[in-house]
Image: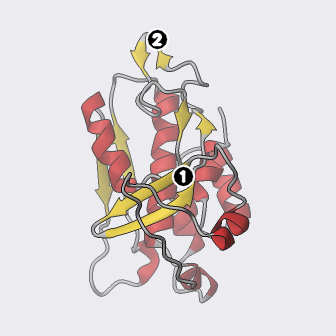
Amino acid sequence: MRNYSATVSSKGQIVIPIKIRNELKVKTGDKIDFILQGDVITIQKGIRFTCPACKGKKDHNDEICFVCDGSSEINPNVSLFYEIERVVSYSISVNLNNDRSDDENLSSSFPKIQVHTKRYPKNVIAWYQDYLQAKAVEQFVDRGDIENNTLDITDIVDSFNLKEVKAAIIKHLPSVKRLSELVITIND
């Protein structure tokens, strides 16, 4: 891990150190995401995808798209808990289940996501549930647990719904990084 610093100007601006700009290939006009978690700020190169739920149309049957908030784009850098807080306003219920008892192994050490609503199409909700599940795996699963066989890959794969997503996850593991981006690229 490398540590860099920058000074905030009187206008609240900072200059991204050249070594970081070069490593991330940041150029003029690129978006940068500032992700606040407690008192820690993570800065990431902004990544945007056309919303796979509404296909960039901003709505579903005259209902604003809850996945992209009607913007036509989705940002995979937002956290699982931010996503859950955000969709509550769309009358969508999200449950995180982790029914592991203390004496069980780590095979269920990440939450299983369930999304419920009657307001949006079932295929969109199934995809969104897999998207949130990918975020949960990214956040709670360590690659070392997979490589050391302390976590059963089957448990991870079985936590997803769509067979296309399951197939892609199998190919992607043991890496758990960028699973949500992988799910975004899988369309119905």
Q: Residues within 10 Å of mark 1 (few under 14, many from 20)?
A: few
Q: As displayed, is residue 183 above or below residue 89?
A: below
What residue is at 52 percent from the left and 82 percent from the top?
A: 3
What residue is at 48 percent from the left and 60 percent from the top?
A: 14
Closest to the observer, 178 or 115: 178
Rendering quarter of residue 39 = bottom left
- Residue extending farthest top: 62
Residue 75 in the image, given as x and y percentages of width and height: 52, 44
- Residue type at mark 2? Asn
Q: As displayed, is residue 54 above or below residue 161?
A: above
Q: Which residue lies under the disc numbered 2? A: 61
What residue is at 32 percent from the left and 66 percent from the top?
A: 98
Q: Is residue 5 left or right of residue 21?
A: left
Badge count:
2
- Residue type at mark 1? Ile
Q: Is residue 187 left or right of residue 11?
A: right
Residue 106: in sight, yes or no? yes
Q: Residues within 10 Å of mark 2 (few under 14, many from 20)?
A: few
Q: As displayed, is residue 105 above or below residue 24?
A: below
Q: Which label belongs to residue 165?
A: none
What residue is at 57 percent from the left and 64 percent from the top?
A: 16
SS category of the residue bearing label 2: loop
Q: Which residue lies under the disc numbered 1? A: 32
Q: Quadrant of the C terminus?
A: top right
